[in-house]
Image (tube, rainbow, N blue to C red):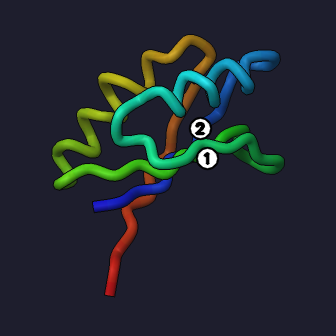
Amino acid sequence: MKAYVMITVRSGAILEVVNNLRRIDGVMDANMTFGPYDVVAVIQAENVHRIGRLIAADIQPIPGVIDTLTCLVLES
């Protein structure tokens, strides 16, 4: 299962957050963006429960992360 995680980051911490995200097992890609969110991460796990744990235990505690919005990918 794959998801896109849109992340709001404290000012001045974007590059640090992106670098930390790229070190996490399950994060396939992480990039700085312009727009309503500062960073978009692509994550992958075997099920929605593991996606939730990845976000709660590994992504949200990163220093500088203010808020996250997760969009699950539906594959046809």
User: Cβ–Cβ below 8 Å for labels 1 and 2?
Assistant: yes
Rate crowding at label 2 as few (under 14), some (14 to 19) or many (20 or more) other CA atoms within 10 Å: many
Q: Quadrant of the N terminus?
A: bottom left
- Where residue 45 sits: x, y (%)? 26, 50
SS under mark 2: strand
User: Is 1 located above or below residue 68 in the figure?
Assistant: below
In-front residue for pair 24/40: 24
Q: Residue at x 40, y 56 (%)?
A: 3
Looking at the rendered structure, the kind of residue marked 1 is Val
- Where residue 48 sits: x, y (%)? 21, 53
Quarter-of-image position of residue 26: top left
- Where residue 31 sits: x, y (%)? 67, 44
Residue pushed farthest bottom? 76
Query: Residue 56's mark?
Result: none
Q: CA distance from mark 1 to mark 2?
A: 6 Å
Looking at the rendered structure, the kind of residue marked 2 is Ile
User: Is 50 located above or below residue 73 in the figure?
Assistant: above
Q: Nearer the viewer, mark 1 or mark 2?
A: 1
**Is tag 1's residue or tag 2's residue first in the polypeptide sequence?**
2
User: Is 35 located above or below residue 32 in the figure?
Assistant: below
Q: Residue at x 49, y 55 (%)?
A: 4
Residue that label 1 marks? 40
Rate crowding at label 1 as few (under 14), some (14 to 19) or many (20 or more) other CA atoms within 10 Å: many
Q: Quadrant of the C terminus?
A: bottom left
In-front residue for pair 27/67: 27
Residue that label 2 marks? 7
Q: Is residue 19 left or right of residue 76?
A: right
Q: Is residue 71 left or right of residue 51?
A: right
Q: Residue at x 28, y 45 (%)?
A: 51
Q: How many marks?
A: 2
Q: Is residue 21 left or right of residue 58?
A: right
SS under mark 1: strand
